[in-house]
Image: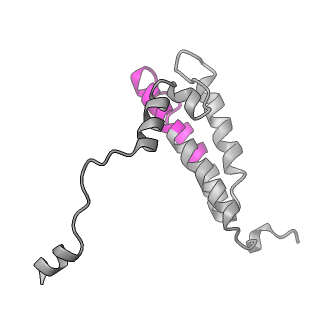
Amino acid sequence: LTAIFVSFFPRPPTAVHHPIRSFHNKAQSSIPYSRRFNQANTSMSSPQAPISLFRSLLREANKVDNYNFRHYAIRRTRAGFAANREMTGNEAVVALNEGQEQLAVLKRQVVLGKLYPSSRSVMEYNV
């Protein structure tokens, strides 16, 4: 039975040359990451980088459509920055990079939330 399954569904070749994909990979490799994804170049040399990241995370969290996800993102942002307040050196750089990744995830979630809007929560009604 496995031989029949394998013969009907052969494995795809491992290295397939795709001209369009290889063009885009070559074109993007010469552009710095910060310019490719329109992100500010945030490094720990700037004392404003963590503050800017914090404000960007809160700004994006407030754009989330769902009440529960929005307040979870706000709570997680505040708690994460409070826990890492005293961080310095290489640990701070790593934490800042992780924060940038979380910001990108949050931006994608905002886009998905706009594509598939949910109904308002009971907590959002003004009584």
What is the residue that sits farthest to the right in this orientation?
Answer: 127
For the rendered model, the colour scheme is: one colour
Whether residue 60 sits left or right of residue 9 in the image: it is right
Horizontal and vertical percent position of residue 60: 68, 46
Which secondary structure type mostly characterizes the magenta part of the structure? helix
Residues 35 and 49: in front is: 35
Location of the C terminus (image quadrant): bottom right
Using the image, determine if residue 11 lies above or below residue 78: below
Location of the N terminus (image quadrant): bottom left
Residues 83 and 110: in front is: 110
Whether residue 81 sits left or right of residue 19 in the image: it is right
Whether residue 122 sits left or right of residue 50 in the image: it is right
Using the image, determine if residue 16 lies above or below residue 44: below
Identify which residue is drawn at 66% across, 38% down. 56
Q: How many marks?
A: 0
Using the image, determine if residue 25 lies above or below residue 89: below
The answer to whether residue 3 is visible is yes
Horizontal and vertical percent position of residue 123: 75, 69
Identify which residue is drawn at 67% across, 43% down. 58
Whether residue 91 sits left or right of residue 45 in the image: it is left
Q: Is residue 65 a member of the stretch shown in magenta?
A: no
What is the residue that sits farthest to the bottom in this orientation?
Answer: 1
Question: Magenta part of the protein: which range?
Answer: 75-100
Q: Is residue 81 a member of the stretch shown in magenta?
A: yes
Identify which residue is drawn at 48% across, 37% down. 24
